[in-house]
């Protein structure tokens, strides 16, 4: 098989594909594996019951059923749904959007593929642009999305050490200097993998920088406001004409319906829609149909407030407690959990790499994600990159507790080893 450059890049080895393969193989080989690796949301019976009721209502109405199964929607997404999303966001946050500011995608991941490649890569004048991540570590799923090489650059964060083994990353504005080669800034807020929530001041500062360079600020709100609202601190959502905000139904409990929502200036939405037509023709109808019913009933807000936010808030606090109990006096730090569905642990001076820790934990029947994968756009020799792991706490409490005990045992053993000089 003779492959194009695109074929070689996208069918070959890439960080995320290898990791997903490895996680999949490990699960197949040991179905009892404690899975704290992937991004699956937790199972909330009350929320699942609401989805079931709404779906049954749609199915019992021949008109709605036909529009769910029997038609291609426009590539920008159902007009009524887009207007509903715009009105909802205006009402919640005082923004001034209309349906033309909204587009639907088959999951936000596919929206990133189109958006990032719209703003970075080879430029018509022969220059090359990259997407800059103002605060690495960032979402692993961005890593291999670029059609060209050297697609991302990133700024190393400042680390604030807090009480009780906690820490928090901040954007290091003294080193954040986008140049002519920067095509966009992008942050996830809340951040996957760390559970960080960039402060309102940080977002305002990033917005200023993006505007002064005439490049967009892309905010990935996969865990953010107004849904799924997996946020444990106060933070103002941010949008203006220079911001591209992406939302997703996945972490609400619907990763299988593959629905993302893009909120942006009309010309950006128009450009995105043209590209999306080529790649997808149209987007799936199930997510918008379910979401429409949830908007109509007001459940889109009540189910996050009543069930989703409290579930993750409580689980994150429990998981931190369990780590404190199990890790005792070891030199560990946990990123302050401010949102999302993961804990990010930093084992300072760990004699083995996070990759080795991942391998050992896999042998012990626990899957986590080794931290170096998240330092997208960063190739320096910062030891910190190999001292962190991401642990999901979305599974049932007993399983999470059991997994944490095993992680702590392996970390304690690793700290007893001599530091490897190679
Ligand atoms: C930060 C972040 N952004 C985007 C995505 C992609 O989500 P989806 O394509 O399911 O909308 C994920 C998935 O885990 C994520 O964690």
Image (cartoon, grey):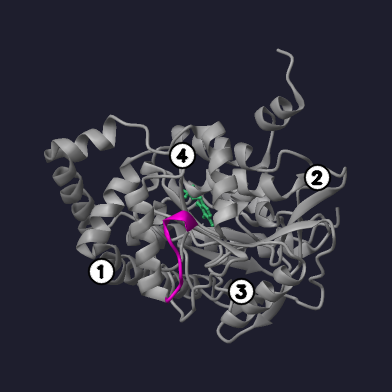
Q: Are marks 2 and 3 in contact (CB under 8 Å)?
A: no
> x, y (%) of residue 83?
36, 57
Residue under label 2: 123
Give the image quarter of residue 377.
bottom right
Q: Which mark is residue 75?
A: 4
Dot 4 or dot 2: first in sequence order is: 4
Q: State the residue at coordinates (48%, 32%).
A: 281
Residue denoted by label 3: 333
The Cα atoms of the two marked residues, 2 and 3, are separated by: 42 Å
On the question of residue 95 being in view, the answer is yes
Q: Nearer the viewer, mark 2 or mark 3?
A: 2
Q: Which residue is mark 1?
A: 302
Is residue 19 depicted above or below 170 in this figure?
Answer: above
Which comes sooner in the sequence, label 1 or label 3?
1
Label 4 to label 3: alpha-carbon separation: 45 Å
Q: Position of residue 335 (x, y in %)?
A: 58, 73
Q: Is residue 258 left or right of residue 53?
A: right
Measured Cα–Cα span from mark 2 to mark 1 = 45 Å
Mark 4 nearby-residue class (10 Å; few <14, some 14–19, many ≥20): many
Q: Which residues are magenta?
A: 94-101
4 or 1: tag closer to the N-terminus: 4
The local secondary structure at tag 3 comes to: strand
* Residue ID at (71%, 68%): 210
**Mark 2 or mark 1: whose residue is earlier in sequence:** 2
**Residue 50 location, quadrant:** bottom left
């Amino acid at each position: 098989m003779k492959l194009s450059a695109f074929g070689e890049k996208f069918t070959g080895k890439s960080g995320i594909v290898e990791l997903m393969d490895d996680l999949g193989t490990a699960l197949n080989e040991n179905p009892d594996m404690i899975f704290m690796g992937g991004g699956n949301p937790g199972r909330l019976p009350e929320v699942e019951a609401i989805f079931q009721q709404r779906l049954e209502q749609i199915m019992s109405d021949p008109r709605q059923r036909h529009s769910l199964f029997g038609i291609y929607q426009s590539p920008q997404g159902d007009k009524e749904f887009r207007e509903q999303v715009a009105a909802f966001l205006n009402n919640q946050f005082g923004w001034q959007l209309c349906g033309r500011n909204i587009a639907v995608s088959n999951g936000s991941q596919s929206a990133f593929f189109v958006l990032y490649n719209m703003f970075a890569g080879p430029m018509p004048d022969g220059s090359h642009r990259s997407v800059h991540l103002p605060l690495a570590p960032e979402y692993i799923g961005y890593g291999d999305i670029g059609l060209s090489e050297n697609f991302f650059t990133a700024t190393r964060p400042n680390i604030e050490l807090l009480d009780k083994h906690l820490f928090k990353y901040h954007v290091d504005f003294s080193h954040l200097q986008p140049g002519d080669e920067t095509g966009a800034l992008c942050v996830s807020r809340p951040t996957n993998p760390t559970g960080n929530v960039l402060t309102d001041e940080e977002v305002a500062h990033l917005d200023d920088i993006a505007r002064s360079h005439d490049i967009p600020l892309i905010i990935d709100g996969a865990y953010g406001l107004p849904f799924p609202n997996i946020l444990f601190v106060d933070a103002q959502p941010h949008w203006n004409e220079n911001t591209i905000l992406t939302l997703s139904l996945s972490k609400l409990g619907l990763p299988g319906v593959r629905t993302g929502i893009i909120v942006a200036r009309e010309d950006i939405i128009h450009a995105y829609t043209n590209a999306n037509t080529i790649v997808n023709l149209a987007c799936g109808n199930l997510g918008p149909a379910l979401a429409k019913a949830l908007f109509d009933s007001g459940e889109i807000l009540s189910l996050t407030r009543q069930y989703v936010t409290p579930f993750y808030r409580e689980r994150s606090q429990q998981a931190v407690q369990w780590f404190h109990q199990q890790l005792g006096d070891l030199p560990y730090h946990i990123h302050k959990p401010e949102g999302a569905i993961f804990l990010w642990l930093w084992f300072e001076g760990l004699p083995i790499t996070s990759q080795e820790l991942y391998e050992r934990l896999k042998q012990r029947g626990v899957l986590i994600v080794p931290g170096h994968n998240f330092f997208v756009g960063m190739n320096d020799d910062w030891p910190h990159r190999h001292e962190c792991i991401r642990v999901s706490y979305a599974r049932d409490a007993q399983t999470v507790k059991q997994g944490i005990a095993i992680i702590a045992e392996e970390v304690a053993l690793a700290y007893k080893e001599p530091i490897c000089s190679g």
